[in-house]
Image (cartoon, rainbow, N blue to C red):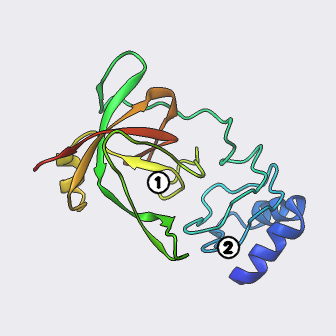
Amino acid sequence: MTHKEQVQLLKRSVPEWNQWRKQNPEIVPNLYRANLQGADLHRANLEGADLHRANLEGAKLEGTILDPKAPANAQVHDFRKANQHSVIGYRTKASSFVRTRQEDGSFEKQVYEPGQVYQAPVFSICRISCHPGLYLAPSVEWLQEHGYRGPYVKVRANIRDVHQAGDKWRCRSFTVIEDVTE
């Protein structure tokens, strides 16, 4: 099934989509750059799907791995705790994936500034590491060891909003504490 056919099937019928997923467990659904804006995806099996740059604005995501009410796994044992409810993490100052619309209608990389709170437009509890959310790491050293180049920022995130998937962590929101000098 082509990318276009997969997107059409998902938009047309979630029960048919879920049946297709059951019949084809070896296929990784390709929803890359899919326009799912406003789509009713209630209870759709999106586990493992490639959702890079998919437009999910206004989509109904209840009962999916993207359900805003679904709890994160709160696996934060590698992080330093800020207090009983939050952890300290680090990330690159600019995001390669999150874009912000400029006044002229163009899009630019999101740059995270100290003192600001950032919310993920979509957040996934999927066990696959490349899914929506705001990414963070337990240390600058971890970022460097995994090939993420600075500059970096130090962030604080609520433990209940952090989700570990594979060897990466993402969260629903964080507050940027400060820029990090290497």
Quarter placement of the N terminus: bottom right
Q: Which residue is outermost to the front? A: 103
Q: Few, some or many C-alpha atoms within 10 Å of disc 1 (few <14, some 14-19, many ≥20)?
A: some
Sequence-wise, the earlier of marks 2 and 1 is 2
Question: Mark 2 sits on what residue?
Answer: 34
Give the label, 2 or 1, closer to the camera.
2
Figure check: 29 above or below 90: below
Task: Please identify the quarter of the rendering in which residue 90 is found.
Answer: top left
**Residue position for label 1:** 129
Residue type of the residue flagged with mark 2: Ala
Task: Indicate the position of residue 57 as horizontal and vertical percent values.
Answer: 69, 59
Point 55% across, 67% down: residue = 52
- Asked whether the beta carbons under mark 2 and mark 1 sit within 8 Å of each other, the answer is no
Which residue is at a point 67% across and 41% down the rendered structure image?
Answer: 68
Please tell me whether mark 2 sits on a helix, a strand or a loop.
Answer: loop
Nearest to the observer: residue 96 or residue 2? 96
Residue 1 in view, yes or no: no
Left or right placement of residue 117 versus residue 25 in this view: left
Residue 90 is labelled as none
Q: Residue at x 62, y 68 (%)?
A: 54
Residue furthest out toward the left: 182
Q: Position of residue 113 (x, y in %)?
A: 33, 49
Compared to 165, does 161 lie above or below? above
3 to the left or right of 77 = right
CA distance for labels 2 and 1? 19 Å
Q: For the residue marked with disc 1, what is the amino acid? A: Ser
User: Which image quadrant for residue 114?
Assistant: top left
